[in-house]
Image (spheres, rainbow, N blue to C red):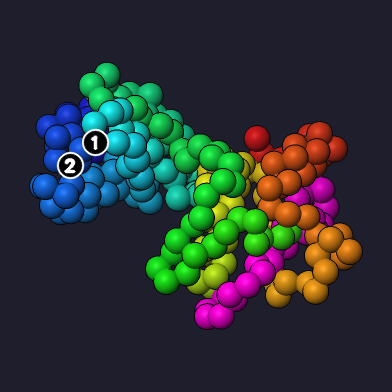
Amino acid sequence: MDTAVFWSWFVGKEAELRDVSEHGEDVLDELYDKLNEVAEGLGFEIGGSPDGPLELIITAEGDEDLFPAVYCLAESAPDIDGWEIVALKPPRGFDFIATYGDRSVDPDDVWFLEIESEERPGELGIRVALEGDTEGDVDDLMTCLLGVMEAGIGEISLACDVGHLEYTEPPEDPVAEGWKPLRELPEVIESWKQRHPSVTGS
């Protein structure tokens, strides 16, 4: 689908998207389908207040190959009263509680350790651990932690700056064993990029 065709559709549907509770959630499914007609794999988030400017965040769902399509679509957006179009999920910091299904994750309960692979020297790897409730499927838990990290540091940084991510059980004494609280991740990434300027992707 041409970007102009997408935005023409969006302008015609923006009132329904502004108040899904009144118009029904089918329009959200339609928005997802229309985005995937532009480029398969795109997603979205809508935030803000129905009484104020809303954000339509167009996301590549972490796929760096789709970043150009996201930028192209966002840059081609017309001025739409009451809407702000955002390319890729921005960094929000870690002052939030994330809820995924029945699980809630406080970023203050997440610790990380820098690691480096012998096969991929210079690439930043992150080993994460969660204190508290770690019951359930590891893949589901990792999905939660990925969401927390993406919200905190932004979609671009997670995709371009973190080359490897893995989960492990939390250490008994994270500080004594060299682990750092998740809030320090942006600083660690910036320091790593300065030390490895030719390796990082952003």
The image shows residue 107 at horizontal and vertical percentages of 61, 56
Looking at the rendered structure, the secondary structure element under dot 2 is loop
Can the viewer see residue 120? no
Can the viewer see residue 183? yes
- Badge 1: residue crowd in 10 Å (few <14, some 14–19, many ≥20): few
The image shows residue 113 at horizontal and vertical percentages of 78, 59
Tell me the tag on residue 50: 1
The image shows residue 38, relative to residue 8, as above or below, that is below
Q: Quadrant of residue 51?
A: top left
Magenta segment main secondary structure: loop
Amino acid type, residue under disc 1 in the picture: Pro
Q: Which residue was labeled with disc 2? A: 19
The image shows residue 177 at horizontal and vertical percentages of 87, 65
Residue at the spot x=82%, y=48% of the render?
122
Q: Extreme bottom residue here?
A: 136
Marks 2/1: CA–CA distance: 7 Å
Asked whether 77 or 178 is in front, the reply is 178
Residue at the spot x=73%, y=72% of the render?
170
Asked whether 56 or 106 is in front, the reply is 106
The image shows residue 189, relative to residue 111, as above or below, that is above
Q: Earlier in the sequence, mark 2 or mark 1?
A: 2
The image shows residue 29, relative to residue 102, as above or below, that is above
Viewport quadrant of the C terminus: top right
**Region rendered in magenta:** 113-138
User: Is disc 2 in contact with disc 1, using a CB cutoff of under 8 Å?
Assistant: yes
Amino acid type, residue under disc 2 in the picture: Asp
Viewport quadrant of the N terminus: top left
Total tally of numbered discs in the picture: 2
Tell me the tag on residue 155: none
